[in-house]
């Protein structure tokens, strides 16, 4: 080997770790790329960190990390650790797009705690009158009585817009439910989300983002009933009650194909929810949570352009596979921020972005920076107090108080970021 070739080889080997650790900002190549497809905004929200506000794919590969799958065509997607909240990779994470029925996650997270599952309700014609043409339905009939539990099964398994409208009526009506959903989205810091309908039916101005849907799913998974409903594969739903006869029931199956499987797509190992959707404007959308070897990941994919069957599920599965293989081998590109009520604001601004990420020039240009703090972490316990012992100086007391306060802040931050529980059915799902 010549001296020149030997030198070139040595330099290339030396540079390899730095090259693999650099953030990727170019979009993942896709065999079905549509040159006429809409382009993401040049500037997007920086909630969760400045890197998440950039267009294109964001990932920071360390040594030994697998490359992202190339056959992912979603306009927007995100891979996040459901427990720590770290975002492992993202693509146009804050692009505001129509959400379809994935918006039902926000509906459930908002309304589910307010109604007892044992409550019975007799459906009126008016409660079904506003269901959009072509909506997915579970098959609710007027003048028939259903439990709240039945209705939620219809929402989660069959994505029934009829069930959403009945539950909204029980919650005080559609306008009130939409308002409460919007308020809850803002509490979660899902600030890309604008709610027009509670069921995700296409309406002008109704948008969300891969980041927001993941944030909403993470919040919903804190609720035991939410976890159980979204992880249920099949259930019996009440049929029509005919006079003098026993009421029949019929089986409904979850439309989440990574949970139940379908022609061309197998159930995903460890899948435990969350919600899928398809409309004319939104295309196909999906947010899924899965567990493998103690690691819990959330993936959202919005509007893939691929023509392969069940593309949104297959692309989600590829991203989940990558996320499990890449765990511990990538630097996070951002985080899922906690709800505002869990954040004292001691470090983040009103939009949940870290102060380190704010463009102080006021120019409104593309956010800068390639890492650093991602903001929104909870800080919080009230200032600790300590009683001085005999002979202890004022300075010593102050130091002790400071140490105690720092420990409590660290513990509080850890608990808030780690309080997201693993969906119970994930433990029970057999390995394949």
Image (cartoon, rainbow, N blue to C red):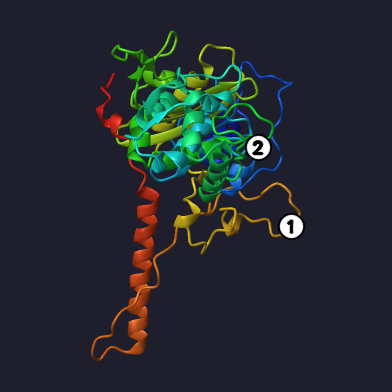
**Relative height, residue 4 to residue 340 (above, below):** above
Count numbered badges in the picture.
2
Query: Relative to the observer, which residue lies in front, 77 or 125?
Result: 125
Q: What numbered label is drawn on residue 55?
A: 2
- Give the residue drawn at x 74%, y 51%: 364
Query: Relative to the observer, which residue lies in front, 109 or 273?
Result: 109
Q: What numbered label is drawn on residue 396?
A: none
Q: Are marks 2 and 1 in contact (CB under 8 Å)?
A: no
Q: What numbered label is drawn on residue 362?
A: 1
**Relative height, residue 76 to residue 237 (above, below):** below
Can the viewer see residue 334 in this picture?
A: yes
The picture quadrant where one finds residue 42 is top right
Residue at the extreme top: 263
Q: Which tag, 2 or 1, sits closer to the chain's start?
A: 2
- Give the residue drawn at x 67%, y 49%: 367
Quarter placement of the C terminus: top left
SS at badge 1: loop
**Relative height, residue 7 to residue 278 (above, below):** below
- Give the residue drawn at x 38%, y 21%: 259
In 3D space, how far apart are the residues under numbered discs 2 and 1 (Cα atoms)? Answer: 20 Å
């Amino acid at each position: 080997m010549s001296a020149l070739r030997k030198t070139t080889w040595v330099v290339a080997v030396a540079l390899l770790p730095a090259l693999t650790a650099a953030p990727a900002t170019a979009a993942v190549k896709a065999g079905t790329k549509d040159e006429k497809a809409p382009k993401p905004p040049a500037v997007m929200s920086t909630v969760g960190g400045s890197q998440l506000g950039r267009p294109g794919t964001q990932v920071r590969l360390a040594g030994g990390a697998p490359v992202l799958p190339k056959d992912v065509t979603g306009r927007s997607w995100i891979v996040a650790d459901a427990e720590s909240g770290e975002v492992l990779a993202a693509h146009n994470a804050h692009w505001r797009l129509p959400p379809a029925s994935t918006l039902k996650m926000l509906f459930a997270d908002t309304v589910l705690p307010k109604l007892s599952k044992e409550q019975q309700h007799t459906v009126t014609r008016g409660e079904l009158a506003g269901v959009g043409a072509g909506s997915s339905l579970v098959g609710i009939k007027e003048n028939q009585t259903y439990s709240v539990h039945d209705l939620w099964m219809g929402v989660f398994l069959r994505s029934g817009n009829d069930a959403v409208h009945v539950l909204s009526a029980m919650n005080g009506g559609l306008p009130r439910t939409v308002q409460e959903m919007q308020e809850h989205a803002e509490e979660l810091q899902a600030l890309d989300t604008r709610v027009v309908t509670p069921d995700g039916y296409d309406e002008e101005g109704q948008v969300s983002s891969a980041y927001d849907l993941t944030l909403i799913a993470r919040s919903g998974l804190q609720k035991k009933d939410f976890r159980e409903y979204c992880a249920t594969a099949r259930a019996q739903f009440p049929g029509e009650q005919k006079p003098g006869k026993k009421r029949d029931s019929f089986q409904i199956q979850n439309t989440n194909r990574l949970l139940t499987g379908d022609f061309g797509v197998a159930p995903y190992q460890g899948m435990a929810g969350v919600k899928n959707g398809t409309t004319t404007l939104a295309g196909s959308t999906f947010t899924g949570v899965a567990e493998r070897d103690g690691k819990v990941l959330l993936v959202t994919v919005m509007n893939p352009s691929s023509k392969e069957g069940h593309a949104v599920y297959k692309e989600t599965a590829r991203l989940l596979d990558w996320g499990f293989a890449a765990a511990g081998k990538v630097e996070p590109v951002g985080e899922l921020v906690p709800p505002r009520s869990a954040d004292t604001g001691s470090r983040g601004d009103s939009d949940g972005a870290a102060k380190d990420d704010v463009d102080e020039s006021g120019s409104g240009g593309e956010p800068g920076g390639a890492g650093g703090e991602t903001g929104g972490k909870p800080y919080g316990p009230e200032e600790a107090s300590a009683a001085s012992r005999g002979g202890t100086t004022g300075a010593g007391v102050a130091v002790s108080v400071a140490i105690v306060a720092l420990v409590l802040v660290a513990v509080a931050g850890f608990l808030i970021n780690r309080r997201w529980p693993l969906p119970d059915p994930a433990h029970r799902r057999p390995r394949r």
